[in-house]
Image: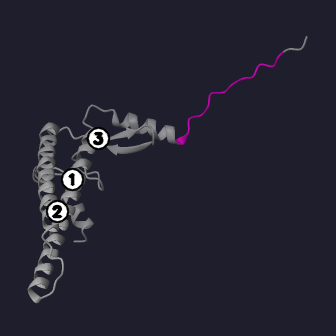
Amino acid sequence: MPTKATAKTTPKKPSRKAVKTAAAASALSTDSAPAEAVNANAGEIKPQQRQDLDIGHYRQLLLDEMARLEEEREYVRKNNSDMDGNLPEDAEGEDDTADLASSLMDKEMDLSVEEEIEDTMSAIEHALRKMEDGTYGICDVSNQPIPKARLELIPWASLTAQMQAMAEGE
């Protein structure tokens, strides 16, 4: 009777990525507060939530500012729509042309203010997502802690002052 060959299975050697991920995880599992944590899915190291921040305090600052901005945006939109009905139809004389130019300038300024409000609201939403991700208070570029004083003034800040200056080309 023929005998079945028994196949010996050798354990699979872990990939370099798995070894690096495991090494990084064990290096980070010390009793001291780690500055970074391993993202097991991507094998990347990402910043970890700061323990020195009162996240509830900063969340409330962000939510208060978001509510204020929503009110301001509605006010600007209402003013803008009210202004649409006040634009002169046909600019016949110099006074009408000046009025039209003034109204258009006001409308342009309101649109600029509304755009700035939208940008700040997006930054606040980003900060709230960072809280959910556990990375609030950590610079998006340098992974360095953002000083508490900066977060008190601009709770939606996602960059340190130095990185912000570099981003703005200063």
Mark with earlier residue (2, 3)? 3
Q: For the C terminus, give its image quadrant.
A: bottom left
Q: For the N terminus, give its image quadrant.
A: top right
Q: Is residue 167 positioned above or below 99 on the image? A: above
Q: Which mark is residue 121?
A: 1
Q: Which residue is mark 2?
A: 81
Q: CA distance from mark 3 to mark 1?
A: 24 Å
Does the magenta-highlighted stretch encompass residue 13? yes
Instruction: Report the span colored magenta.
Output: 4-16
The residue under label 1 is which amino acid type?
Answer: Met
Q: Which residue is mark 3?
A: 48
Q: Residues within 10 Å of mark 2 (few under 14, many from 20)?
A: few
Mark with earlier residue (3, 1)? 3
Q: Is residue 168 positioned above or below 15 on the image? A: below
Check disc 3 and report its element: helix, strand or loop: loop
Along the viewing direction, whichever of 142 and 75 lies nearer the viewer: 75
Q: Find residue 147 and report its horizontal and vertical position in percent.
A: 15, 51
Q: What secondary structure is the magenta-colored segment mainly? A: loop
Q: Which label lies toward us, 1 or 2?
A: 2
- Measuring 21% from the left and 66% from the top, which residue is drawn there? 165
- Measuring 12% from the left and 70% from the top, which residue is drawn there? 86
Along the viewing direction, whichever of 33 and 136 lies nearer the viewer: 136
Q: Is residue 101 positioned above or below 25 on the image? A: below
Along the viewing direction, whichever of 102 and 43 lies nearer the viewer: 102
Does the magenta-highlighted stretch encompass residue 42? no
